[in-house]
Amino acid sequence: MKPAKTWLARIAGVLLAFAALNGAQAASDKTLRAVVHADLKILDPTWTTTYITNRYGYLVYDTLFALNSKFEPRPQMVDTYSVSDDKLTYSFTLRKGMTFHDGQPVRAADCVASLKHWVVRDMMGQMLAKVTADYEVVDDLTFRLKLKEPYGLVIDTLGKPATPAFIMPERIASKPATEQITESIGSGPFMMKRDEWRPGNKAVFVKFANYIPRSEPPDYMSGGKIVKLDRVEWLYIPDNNTTLSALMAGEIDYFEAPPLDFIKLLQENSDIKVLNIDKLGVQFVLRPNFLAPPFDNFKGRQALLYLVNQEEVMQAAVGNPDLYLKFCGAYFLCNSANETQIGSEPMRKPDYAKAKQLLTEAGYKGEKIVLLLPTDRPQYAAAVTVLGAALRKAGIAVDMQSADWSTISVRRARKDPIDKGGYHIFITTQGGPDTASPVANTWFGSGCDKANPGWPCDPELEPLVTAWTRETDAAKKHELVEKIQARGYVSVPYIPYGQFFQPIAFRSNIKGVLESGQPVYWNIEKQ
């Protein structure tokens, strides 16, 4: 079957499902039908940084700590904790009564195994691992983290919101980090219905009856995760117009990432509520592949800076000027405590001749530059299209290769040569408090083979970031941020390609949606 026919068949199937649900009233009043931004294909939240898998993780798993609305880490699975006087030993005691979805109790040994598994792949976890001497299981509910030297970001690391340390059963977490986890057993507020998972179409989650929420009210990602729904259905519909029609007709309840040119229309509908749940905003990331010439040379990556016109990118990808910043050259987000524009001068005005010169100096000889263009992410596709046009203006041959976002997410993680399925550049997004931190910004991390896909490699950045983690004086800390960003614009782990805001949309009978920085499904009720 041809791809276009395949999509049409899927859309037709979804529409028939909607009709059946409405006609027979088969769906419970406590079922939330949400159209998500991508197809769920990877069930290992330590394996990928994709938003869809991270959001799946928050449904199925729980975390030791979580951020509140002031971006302060607060205990989540942890009941109490203490720090020794010499700042070298952290002791954690878990809340009583927590169980995994398979009925087994959550133990300290599960937490230790999960942390050991997670720190291998996560950038902020890797920083913690370097100063970790040992873990000690004291009893079923208590474990200790022992450090080689004082490290001020232990709790911040355990409470990071993006790609956090999700806690898994020891038998699963003990698998090598080089092996992708395929089981779906956590202790989170929802359980995945594996028998109803249809990749390319639908994923289903049901309330975990034995989940014990904290007693505090929910606050951002922290506090009580009280589940008021029986069932959450994630629907993947690549055609946004179909989703828009379904939301307006009440056939779905929740549109996770409506194209930004839909926002005004949605705001005019009294049956729909539009809400921006991420006040810091979203950053476009233009990611060159450090393994693929000419971007293995820093001059090739610097050339991309001279092709940037953020206003043009934002007009194409966002449209509504109320939803984007005209320019942001900050790696760690504009409007954050770590904002600085140092080093971003080449992006102020395109210079196609300079870009071509740098690419030539990097060894470019006219070969096609492969750009990955997602067919089901309109904002990403628009940004890639603008980039392709800018490259062509600089005299660069461009090969745009199209696929759905989930396929691109798998492809970008492979280190294949260009002639065997590799790529030169892809575009993604990130946002929230993790992006605003030099140590937590996963796409800025330049740890070579341990870095995110694209594999930026700069040994000079790591000591600067390490110094930032240890500095306690606010003024000196900001001076280090400026040095880190200045170095970033030399090695260019990625290009900040613009900053915008992505609201969600849902039916007006949906209550309790949290301003949590990313979509979560606890506290929501359907009236």
Image (cartoon, rainbow, N blue to C red):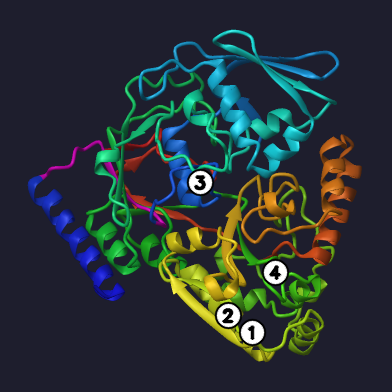
Residue with the mark numbered 4:
327
Residue 15 occupies which quadrant of the picture? bottom left
**From the viewer's perspective, is 365 left or right of 381?**
right
Q: Sort mark 3 into few (<14), some (14-19) or many (20+) by Cα contacts within 10 Å.
A: many
* Badge 1 amino acid: Ala
The Cα atoms of the two marked residues, 3 and 4, are separated by 23 Å
* Residue 27 included in the magenta stretch of the image: yes
Residue with the mark numbered 1:
390
Query: Which mark is first along the chain, 1 or 4?
Result: 4
**From the viewer's perspective, is 242 left or right of 292?**
left
The boundaries of the magenta stretch are 25-38
Q: Sort mark 2 into few (<14), some (14-19) or many (20+) by Cα contacts within 10 Å.
A: some
Vertical comparison of 270 with 95: above or below:
below
174, 518: nearer the viewer: 174
251, 207: nearer the viewer: 207
* Badge 2 amino acid: Val
**From the viewer's perspective, is 21 left or right of 182?**
left
The Cα atoms of the two marked residues, 4 and 2, are separated by 16 Å
Q: Sort mark 1 into few (<14), some (14-19) or many (20+) by Cα contacts within 10 Å.
A: many
